[in-house]
Amino acid sequence: MTIIGLAPSTIHAARVRVVPIGAQRWRVLDHAGRALGQLVASGEPDDMRYRARRFHPASGTFRDVGDFRRAGEALECLRLLR
């Protein structure tokens, strides 16, 4: 199982807290500790993609919000959808 780290500057710029929950998967929290969604990495190290996902309470599932080339963009997307 490989866990890809996120640069602290990426996380700080998005003003969120990121908690690893598996290989290439993080829970994204706001400054108050409320869950904003998940960040999922996929692809090869030289062509990494990041998917932003939000929980949909009515269906009890996560829904994809978008795919991004940079983790910071996916984190910012989750933060702004709050």
Image (tube, rainbow, N blue to C red):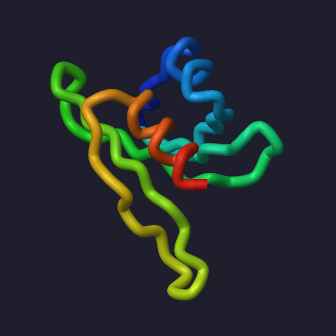
Q: Position of residue 5 (x, y in %)?
A: 48, 22
The vertical placement of 42 against 69, above or below, is below
Q: In the drawing, does residue 31 fall left or right of residue 43? A: right
Q: Position of residue 72 (x, y in %)?
A: 44, 28
Tally of numbered tags: 0
Task: Look at the image and tell me in which quarter the N terminus lies.
Answer: top left
- Furthest toward the bottom, the residue is 58
- Furthest toward the right, the residue is 32
Q: In the drawing, does residue 67 fall left or right of residue 79? A: left
Q: Position of residue 33 (x, y in %)?
A: 79, 45
User: In the figure, residue 50 lies in which quadrant?
Assistant: top left
The one nearer the camera, 1 or 72, is 72
Q: Position of residue 48 (x, y in %)?
A: 24, 30
Q: In the drawing, does residue 7 fall left or right of residue 24? A: right
The vertical placement of 34 against 15, above or below, is below
Task: Look at the image and tell me in which quarter the C terminus lies.
Answer: bottom right
Which residue is pictured at 35% across the width and 47% down the height?
51
The vertical placement of 70 against 80, above or below, is above
Which residue is pictured at 41% across the width and 68% down the height?
63
Which residue is pictured at 56% across the width and 20% down the height?
13
Which residue is pictured at 50% across the width and 19% down the height?
10
The one nearer the camera, 54 or 19, is 54
